[in-house]
Every structure is written in structure tokens, then in C-alpha cells.
Image (cartoon, coloured by chain):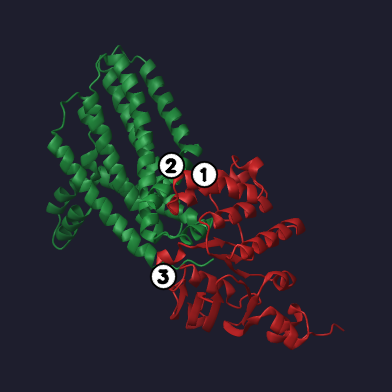
Chain colours: A green, B red
């Protein structure tokens, strides 16, 4: 595990030495504070709107950080050739994949903690109540979802040669799943065969990232999600993470590396 | 004397990029043996197959046929690389890290304890004379300084075998002399050094034995003193004779 943790540490150091995270945090803070300071017709639901905007920004920022960070890991190692001194040590390609995944995932977790801390302070100062467990569930589920996204992007980073192409394709795919993933079964019902079966297969194959989006429960002050459901969602996410990491390793172990 | 590095009928073929069909033979039945404690120079003109051999030895590239082993372990096993140190020709390191952080990262990979890592990092930073810049990001270093970081990372695990790919490439005369001193010092400590170089004078000075490859094939392997005596010329002339260089007069 030493090797995996060493790689994880380097990924985290890289993230906090780059400016992306700070720019996104400042941007989220500025937009949220600007929205929070405005008063639209003395609307009593202004806090709800504020929460909605802030959570949307957190979701977009976290996705940008996760996809951007994961997409450049292995291509950058190959382009800058840092992979050579690394693999000249007793390091397996599986350890590289797992180390990169854990680094990106933990870095995104740290970013989420900062974003949600800001969210708690902003909404708490307006509502004067602190449903910390609800926020924790929302953050946890989002973090698990980001794990699936990072594993998918790492797999893409080995399949596609350019980091930018991989990031764009993965971003479109993730946003597509988030927006229409839940409706695919209904679309399938309205289609003739064999299209219907084809869409159904896609519906059951894709990771349903939209299940992890519980922003509405936070915005409309619903109660806690049953912990069992949170646990099952965690297992479902973990299964997809393992699947994508395994696929990434299969592709990476066959890659020829030449100085 | 025990054999530390061995290749046996090593053959590597690449897909031919120029004609887009067939294959290009980069190495053809290469047999090499490097003994413990010797400094071994691996020579050849550009495109001779030196880098391909190193790529196979370091596990970056699988051989098409034949075998390669380090310490008797097949190079495809990561554990074969536990006791080696590798210095690439150019500097390929995480430039957002400081030299100290980079060395700590590699020390962690080798499973060194905190106190052992501290001790070795301090000693290596002193050896490569980077004490004044150890806490600065590598991206702020000059080429010579980056090459010295590379040397330090190659030594972090106190390896028994060092593989250097043109270690003095791009260095000024002072930098070259320091690298030569370090190689000599490693030899005195009983380490084995396997390195490729185009600096034949340097090779003649520090190497016990050399191998010369050309067009993927081993042309000669032997002691530097024997080769020089047999050809009654310096190593550069020996090298040119062996690769079949014909000087052409410019009219």
C-alpha cells in the first residue's frame, strides 16, 4: 500500500498547488454571496433559491475539478515522461491506476468539504438551523458519484490519446446521464423493437449517477434519507468504480511505453 | 563473479511506422552479461537499439522473444526493479514538487522507514550538492540541477545496480566531471553501473567492460583494455571500426 499512498499524496499535492480549485471556490462564493445579498420582491423562499444556486455551483465545480484532474493524470505522466522513472521502480501499473484514482477521489473529497462548509455557513446564517446530517448525506453521495466519474475518466484517459478529448467526452457523458439517465426506460417503452431493447440495455448498463443527486431534498428541507439506501448507493457506486478501474488496468497493461 | 544483468537472444520488433506494414527489428538476438561490481558501457550509434534494450530491462517494453533478467529475476516482474536505480537521459520528474519531496515520494515507494528516508535524503542532497535548493520546486532548477535530482532519486534505495541512460548528456564540463566522480565512487562501493553514452573518452576512463551494438545486433563485448590493445587504437577508433564507419573525403 506504500506505493499507492505515495502516488495518492503526489496527486493531492498537485491539485492544491494548481489554481483550479481556488478559482472555482472563489467563483462559487462570489456568485452565492451576490445572489444571497439580492432581495427579489421580499420573497420568503429566497433561501431556497440561494441553496439551489449554491448546490448547483458546487455540483458543477466538483465535476469540473474531478474530470479535469482525473483526465490529465495518466496523459500528463506519459507526455512529461514522469511515468518512466516511476515504472522503473518496483511499481505495477495497477498500483499506478489505484494511486491516481485515490489521489483524485480524496482531493475531490477535500474540495467538497470546503465547498459544503461554505454552503453550511451561508444557509445557516439565513435559516438559523443546521441540518448537518442531511448535508453530510448529500456530500457523501456526491463524493461516491465523483468516485464513479473519476474511475470512468481514468479509463477514458488510457483509451483516448488526448486529455482534452477525454475530458470533453466524459463531461458530455456524465451530464447526459445526470439529465436523461432516469428517463431512458420510459423512452425505451415508446420505441419499436429492436431499438427499445437497445435503449433498455443502455439503461441497465450505465451508472445511474442521477441517483446521487439529492439537491432537491436539501432545498425543500426533506428528512434524512434512510441510511440503508445510502449504504446500497455506496455499494452500487463502488461496484462501478471497481469495474472502470479494472477496465483501465486492462487497457493500461497492454500499452507500450517507449522512451 | 555473479551475473547481475543478463539478456538471452533478446529480440524486439516494432510495427513499421514508415511503410505501415510489416515490422522493424529493433533488437536481434542480443546476448549481454554484466557482472557484479563492474562499470559497463553500452555503446552504439543512434538507432542501434540501446534505448530499446534499456526499455526492456526496465519493463517498459515486452520482448518479442528471448529473455532479460536482473538479479536472476525476469524483468517483467516489478520486484526485479527493487534493487536498481535508473537515471533517464532527460529529466522527467514532477516539477511541482521540491527535490526533498520527490526523494521522499520515491523513498515511500521503496518502503523506507521515516528515519531511514530522512537519513538518505539528507545524505543524497549533500552528495549532489543541492542543499541550498532542496526546498524549492524542481521547475525552478537549471538543467544541471535537475540532472542532479535525477541522480539522487536513482540512489534513494541504495541500489546494487545503476542503469544510466547518457548520464552526462547536456551537462557542462564541471557537471560531467561530478557525474564521473559519482560513478567512480559507486564502483568503489561495489555497485554495478550499466550506462549508455556517446562520450567515448568518458567511457574509456570509467568503464571496465563495454558492449557495442549496431542495427540491433551485438558487435562486440569485452574489457576496454583488451579492445584497445587488440585494435591498437583508442576506444573512439575501435568503435568506428566496429560499426564499419568509412570516412569520406570532402572535395
Residue B54 rendering spot, x and y as whole percentages: 54, 70
Q: Which residue in the protein does label 2 denote?
A: A12
Q: Residue furthest right?
A: B251
Residue B103 rendering spot, x and y as whole percentages: 53, 49
Q: Secondary structure at mark 1?
A: helix
Is residue A219 or residue B184 the one in the foreground? B184
Q: Secondary structure at mark 3?
A: loop
Identify the disc placed on residue B76.
Answer: 3
Q: Which of the marked residues, 3 or 1, is nearer the chain's N terminus?
A: 3
Residue A32 rendering spot, x and y as whole percentages: 38, 24
Disc 2 + disc 1, Cβ < 8 Å: no
Disc 2 + disc 3, Cβ < 8 Å: no
Q: Is residue B40 above or below residue A221?
A: below
Q: Which residue in the protein does label 1 denote?
A: B118
| Eye-nearest disc, 2 or 3 | 3
Residue B95 in view of the camera: no
User: For mark 3, does the 10 Å Cα neighbourhood hold few (<14), some (14 to 19), or many (20 or more) residues?
Assistant: many
Residue drawn at the location 75% of the way across and 56% of the way down: B174
Residue drawn at the location 76% of the way across and 81% of the way down: B237
CA–CA distance in space, label 2 to label 1: 22 Å
CA–CA distance in space, label 3 to label 1: 31 Å
Task: Write down the chain letter for disc 1.
Answer: B
Task: Answer left or right for A215 relative to B220.
Answer: left
Residue A34 rendering spot, x and y as whole percentages: 41, 20
Amino acid at each position: 500500500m506504500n506505493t499507492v499512498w505515495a502516488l495518492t499524496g503526489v496527486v493531492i499535492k498537485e491539485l492544491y498547488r494548481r489554481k483550479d480549485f481556488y478559482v472555482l471556490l472563489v467563483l462559487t462564493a462570489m456568485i452565492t454571496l451576490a445572489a444571497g445579498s439580492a432581495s427579489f420582491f421580499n420573497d420568503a423562499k429566497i433561501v431556497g433559491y440561494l441553496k439551489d444556486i449554491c448546490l448547483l455551483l458546487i455540483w458543477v465545480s466538483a465535476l469540473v475539478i474531478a474530470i479535469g484532474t482525473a483526465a490529465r493524470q495518466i496523459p500528463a505522466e506519459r507526455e512529461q515522461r514522469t511515468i518512466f522513472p516511476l515504472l522503473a521502480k518496483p511499481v505495477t501499473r495497477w498500483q499506478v491506476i489505484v494511486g491516481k484514482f485515490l489521489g483524485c477521489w480524496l482531493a475531490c473529497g477535500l474540495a467538497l468539504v470546503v465547498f459544503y462548509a461554505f454552503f453550511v455557513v451561508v444557509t445557516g446564517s439565513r435559516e438559523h438551523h443546521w441540518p448537518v446530517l442531511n448535508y453530510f448525506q448529500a456530500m457523501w453521495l456526491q463524493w461516491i458519484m465523483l468516485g464513479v466519474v473519476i474511475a470512468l475518466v481514468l479509463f477514458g484517459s488510457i483509451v483516448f490519446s488526448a486529455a482534452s478529448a477525454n475530458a470533453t467526452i466524459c463531461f458530455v457523458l456524465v451530464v447526459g446521464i445526470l439529465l436523461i439517465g432516469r428517463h431512458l426506460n420510459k423512452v425505451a417503452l415508446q420505441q419499436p423493437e429492436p431499438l427499445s431493447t437497445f435503449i433498455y440495455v443502455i439503461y441497465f448498463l450505465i451508472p445511474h449517477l442521477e441517483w446521487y443527486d439529492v439537491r432537491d431534498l436539501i432545498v425543500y428541507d426533506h428528512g434524512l434519507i434512510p441510511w440503508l439506501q445510502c449504504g446500497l448507493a455506496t455499494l452500487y457506486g463502488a461496484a462501478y468504480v471497481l469495474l472502470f478501474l479494472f477496465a483501465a488496468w486492462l487497457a493500461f497493461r497492454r500499452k507500450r511505453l517507449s522512451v | 563473479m555473479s551475473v547481475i544483468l543478463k539478456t538471452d537472444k533478446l529480440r524486439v520488433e516494432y510495427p513499421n511506422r514508415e511503410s505501415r506494414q510489416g515490422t522493424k527489428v529493433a533488437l536481434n538476438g542480443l546476448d549481454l552479461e554484466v557482472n557484479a561490481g563492474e562499470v559497463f558501457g553500452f555503446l552504439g550509434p543512434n538507432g542501434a537499439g540501446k534505448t530499446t534494450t534499456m526499455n526492456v530491462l526496465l519493463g517498459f517494453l515486452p520482448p518479442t522473444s528471448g529473455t532479460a533478467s536482473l538479479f536472476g529475476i525476469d524483468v517483467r516482474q516489478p520486484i526485479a526493479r527493487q534493487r536498481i536505480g535508473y537515471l533517464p537521459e532527460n529529466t522527467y520528474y514532477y516539477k511541482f514538487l521540491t527535490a526533498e519531496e520527490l526523494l521522499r515520494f520515491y523513498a515511500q515507494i521503496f518502503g523506507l522507514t521515516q528515519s531511514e528516508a530522512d537519513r538518505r535524503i539528507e545524505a543524497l542532497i549533500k552528495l549532489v550538492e543541492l542543499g541550498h535548493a532542496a526546498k524549492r520546486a524542481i521547475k525552478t532548477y537549471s538543467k544541471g540541477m535537475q540532472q542532479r535530482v535525477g541522480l539522487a532519486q536513482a540512489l534513494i534505495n541504495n541500489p546494487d545496480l545503476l542503469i544510466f541512460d547518457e548520464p552526462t548528456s547536456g551537462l557542462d564540463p564541471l557537471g560531467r566531471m561530478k557525474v564521473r566522480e559519482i560513478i567512480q565512487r559507486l564502483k568503489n562501493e561495489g555497485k554495478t553501473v550499466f550506462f549508455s553514452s556517446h562520450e567515448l573518452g568518458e567511457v574509456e576512463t570509467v568503464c571496465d567492460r563495454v558492449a557495442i551494438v549496431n542495427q540491433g545486433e551485438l558487435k562486440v563485448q569485452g574489457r576496454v583494455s583488451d579492445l584497445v590493445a587488440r585494435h591498437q587504437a583508442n576506444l573512439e577508433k575501435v568503435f568506428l571500426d566496429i560499426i564499419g564507419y568509412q570516412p569520406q573525403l570532402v572535395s
